[in-house]
């Protein structure tokens, strides 16, 4: 599928592939601010959730929960946390027990000395599910959380009731065959992100994910309250290791090989699953633009789609109420 020059840049930026070129950064910011920033409905930036912790593999993982019934597990991606779901979980808690977890090393979960590979995150997530004894789970997931959710469904299909996903790091966009196949700008950005020292400077030292990428990849202007909530877990520079690890997990040119296999396994499972699936998307989107919707419709048997309006990548910050309404209605119907 062909994307415009702008969308190639946006896609690259989302996964930490931003170069240190001032001209590219300035052009990107200018284009996004003029072309995509709209006056949207006010979005609440205060989280009214109660913090909980559970011991997982010798460390603590943070989560919030509300409601009763079968679990609805919310999975975030990079560089966010359970805070991303603050305006959505209250809209669906009548449909089940909502659980929004902070992935290991992210949000208020502990930050052990691990690589933070996809395999690490998957292992801690599976252990989290076991620790809370979650059964018959509906997964609601975004970004790398979508890959984690689909992966969990492939290894524990007996424990997954349904899947909802949005703006996921998933096939068919990933994996890429080569850096060149991504286009000059996008390929160069990913090379920079995966290059030792250069990637560290961009993401660890300059904190580009939280300070630049996050606020630019939404259609509304992120308020200071929300921005500070996303900043807080990573004030200490040593806490930013997971933010750098995620973009280096993006499969390009056959590496990491295990993540190429991961995407192939997820795509195969999408084609064979009989579970209810909901795809939530926005326009223009980033990694799940409207142009990709037909692919998922032709691949996933029991797929429903929900268009929620204007949004880029962090659509929970753009359209939380539309997402919440779509999820609540879908959950009500699959629970009947």
Image (cartoon, helix red, strand yellow):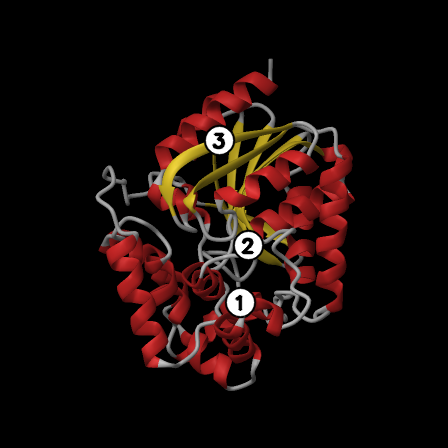
Specify the label residue 306 is tagged with. Answer: 3
Secondary-structure class at tag 3: strand
Secondary-structure class at tag 1: helix
Q: Callout 3: 10 Å neighbours few (<14), some, many (20+)? A: some
Compared to 61, does 299 lie above or below?
Answer: above
Q: Callout 1: 10 Å neighbours few (<14), some, many (20+)? A: many
Q: Is residue 143 left or right of residue 297?
A: left
Q: Is residue 202 left or right of residue 71?
A: left
Nearer the observer, disc 3 or disc 2? 3
Nearer the observer, disc 3 or disc 1? 3
Q: How far apart are the two marked residues, 3 and 1, measured between alpha carbons?
A: 31 Å
Q: Is residue 201 left or right of residue 249?
A: left
Q: How far apart are the two marked residues, 2 and 1, measured between alpha carbons?
A: 10 Å
Residue pictured at 56% horizontal, 17% vertical: 333
Determine which quarter of the picture holds residue 159. top right
Q: Are marks 3 and 1 in contact (CB under 8 Å)?
A: no
- Is residue 140 visible from the viewing direction of this image? no
Q: Are marks 2 and 1 in contact (CB under 8 Å)?
A: yes
Q: Earlier in the sequence, mark 3 or mark 1?
A: 1
Q: Quadrant of the C terminus?
A: top right
Which residue matches tag 2? 103
Single out the residue that lies furthest toward the top: 336
Q: Is residue 114 left or right of residue 65?
A: right
Q: Earlier in the sequence, mark 2 or mark 1?
A: 2
Which residue matches tag 1? 242
Residue 92 image position (x, y, % from top left) = 46, 27
């Amino acid at each position: 599928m062909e994307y415009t020059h702008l969308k190639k840049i946006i896609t690259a930026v989302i996964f930490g592939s931003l170069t240190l070129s001032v001209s590219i950064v300035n052009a990107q910011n200018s284009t996004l601010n003029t072309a995509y920033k709209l006056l949207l409905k006010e979005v609440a930036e205060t989280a009214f959730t109660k913090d909980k912790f559970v011991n997982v593999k010798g460390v603590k993982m943070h989560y919030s929960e509300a409601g009763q019934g079968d679990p609805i597990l919310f999975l975030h991606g990079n560089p966010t946390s359970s805070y991303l779901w603050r305006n959505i979980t209250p809209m669906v808690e009548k449909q089940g027990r909502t659980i929004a977890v902070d992935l290991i090393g992210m949000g208020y979960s502990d930050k052990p000395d691990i690589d933070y590979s996809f395999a690490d995150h998957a292992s801690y997530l599976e252990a989290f599910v076991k620790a809370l004894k979650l059964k018959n789970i509906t997964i609601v997931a975004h970004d790398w959380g979508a890959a984690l959710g689909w992966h969990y469904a492939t290894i524990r299909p007996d424990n997954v009731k349904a899947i909802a996903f949005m703006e996921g790091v998933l096939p068919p966009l990933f994996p890429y065959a080569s850096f060149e196949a991504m286009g000059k700008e996008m390929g160069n950005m990913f090379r920079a992100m995966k290059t030792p020292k250069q990637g560290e400077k961009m993401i660890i030292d300059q904190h580009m994910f939280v300070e630049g990428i996050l606020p630019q990849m939404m259609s509304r202007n992120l308020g200071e309250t929300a921005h500070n909530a996303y900043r807080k877990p990573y004030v200490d520079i040593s806490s930013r290791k997971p933010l750098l690890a995620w973009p280096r997990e993006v499969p390009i040119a056959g590496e990491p090989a295990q993540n190429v296999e991961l995407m192939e396994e997820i795509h195969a499972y999408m084609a064979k699953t009989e579970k209810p699936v909901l795809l939530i998307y926005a326009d223009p989107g980033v990694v799940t633009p409207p142009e990709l919707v037909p692919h998922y419709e032709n691949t996933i048997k029991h797929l429903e789609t929900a268009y929620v309006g204007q949004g880029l990548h962090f659509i929970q910050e753009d359209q939380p109420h539309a997402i919440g309404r779509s999820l609540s209605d879908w959950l009500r119907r699959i629970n009947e």
